[in-house]
Amino acid sequence: MSISLNGGRTRLADFFLTLTLLALSLTACGPDAPPPEQAIGNLVQQAQDAGAAGDVDGLLTVLSSDYHDIDGRDRRKMGFLLRTLFARYPDSVVLVRGLAVTLISDELANANMQVFVVARDKASSAPLDLDGERLWMRLDLRLEDHDWRVTRAQWRSEQWN
């Protein structure tokens, strides 16, 4: 079961892109802060927990005020999308594999990863009627007031060249 949106992507793909995007902001980068790669790994787990709890506001805090994605969504539109998708897919599993962080400077970074998602539509009555998605994602991050924030996101269903 797949629900088509613009460009052929599914709502489920957008949902899990959003969860992963929000997972990849870094926490404080003071002198005792872990290296960026470790902080991102820790934060991915924290974001997955927030996603499982349906904590939209908690997830949105990792986006920069000037965030935008490949579909032109900003923070406000992403909040609306998250609320809609959490209502439709209340139970989901997200796995991030192959996370690779590239530091461009002290204030800029990119992250690439593969994301696997399995979820069940709330309207489905069959327990095994699951929807699945595999995405390759690229994120641009910027250090803002000692916290990393996601400024841009790109994703696709095929591996990047």
Image (tube, rainbow, N blue to C red):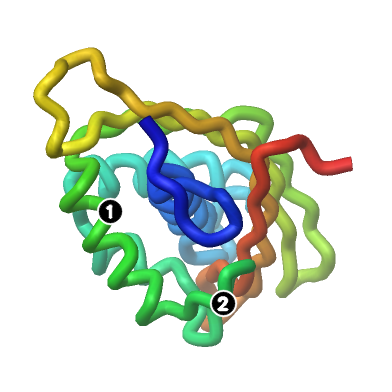
SS class of the residue under badge 1? helix
Q: What residue type is labelled 2?
A: Gly
- Single out the residue that lies furthest toward the top: 128
Q: What residue lies at 23% left-to-right and 13% top-to-bottom?
A: 128
Crowding around mark 2 (Cα neighbors within 10 Å: few <14, some 14 to 19, many 20+) is few
- Pointer 2 or 1: first along the chain: 2
User: Which of the 4 image quadrants contains residue 132?
Assistant: top left
Q: What residue lies at 27% left-to-right and 53% top-to-bottom?
A: 85
SS class of the residue under badge 2? loop
> Can you say which quadrant of the picture contains the N terminus?
top left
The Cα atoms of the two marked residues, 2 and 1, are separated by: 18 Å
The answer to whether residue 119 of the structure is visible from this angle is: yes
Q: Where is residue 45 in the image (x, y as percent from the top left)?
A: 40, 39
Q: Position of residue 63 (x, y in %)?
A: 47, 71
Q: What residue type is labelled 1?
A: Leu
User: Which of the 4 image quadrants contains residue 78?
Assistant: bottom left
**Which of the pair 60/37 is nearer the observer?**
60
Q: What residue lies at 37% left-to-right and 28% top-to-bottom?
A: 131
Q: Position of residue 110 (x, y in %)?
A: 73, 58
Q: What residue lies at 46% left-to-right and 56% top-to-bottom?
A: 5
Q: Where is residue 47 in the image (x, y as percent from the top left)?
A: 37, 48
> Can you say which quadrant of the picture contains the C terminus?
top right
Q: Which mark is residue 8?
A: none
The answer to whether residue 43 of the structure is visible from this angle is: no
Q: Do the residues labelled 2 and 1 touch (CB within 8 Å)?
A: no
158 versus 56 height, above or below: above
Q: Which residue lies under the disc numbered 1?
A: 85
Q: Which residue lies under the disc numbered 2?
A: 72
